[in-house]
Image: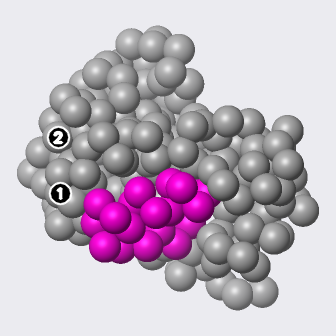
Amino acid sequence: MTQPFIALTFDDGPHPVNTPRLLDLLKQRNVKATFYVVGTNAKRYPEIMRRIVAEGHEIGNHTVTHPNLSKMSAEGVRNELRVCHEAIVSATGVAPRTMRPPYGAITSAQKSWIKKEFGYSTILWSVDPEDWKRPGSSVVTSRLLSGAGPGGILLVHDIHAPTIDAMPSTIDQLLAKGYQFVTVTQLLAMEPKG
């Protein structure tokens, strides 16, 4: 992919303080993002879930309790995805179309039957600034900028305040470089089918 499209993804929310602040920043810049929500938080903050969808962002399934799926039985994985799916639909009326395995831990066999049963593409990432280690917002920004490329998927977490602090500068600099932000499913739709 040569066009400068990029997907910004936020994991583990929604968070009662950080996610609304993030949504304000995205709205000011007219940037769309994808939120991989955890089912427990989706149930806890349905109004934030509705705002995410109302403002044109995408929501993906990030399981209900954030376990390592690669170490679980098929039934356990099904339950994690189903409960999160139901929480998302019940809050927003919109079904998720993609999933992201916690820690990126998933087997190829799991990816295959999850796609068949749930219709979800499994989404990983191309840039991880390790914001969960809290390196500081300027470090998060510089790691995202140096890792970004056309067709990239940036991974950050909206549960950490310093990550939200990093977003205005990160987004403004990526926009200045000519990047256009799209949701994950928009990005997938652009990829040439081989």
Left or right of residue 55, residue 28 in this image:
left
Residue 130 locus on image (x, y percent): 56, 25
- Residue located beneath label 1 in the image: 51
Image quadrant containing the N terminus: bottom right
- Residue located beneath label 2 in the image: 20
Residue 54 locus on image (x, y percent): 18, 67
Name the magenta segment's main secondary structure: helix
Which circle marks residue 174 in the picture?
none
Image quadrant containing the C terminus: bottom right
Which scheme is used to colour this image of the protein?
A: one colour
User: Magenta residues?
Assistant: 81-100
Left or right of residue 91, residue 136 in this image:
right
Residue 166 locus on image (x, y percent): 30, 28
- Asked if 92 appears above or below 154 in the picture, the reply is below
Residue at figure coordinates x 60%, y 37% from the top left = 66
Secondary structure under tag 1 reads helix
Choose top left, top right, bottom left or bottom right for residue 192. Answer: bottom right
Sequence-earlier tag: 2 or 1: 2
The reply to whether dot 2 and dot 1 touch (C-beta < 8 Å) is: yes
- Asked if 86 appears above or below 132 in the picture, the reply is below
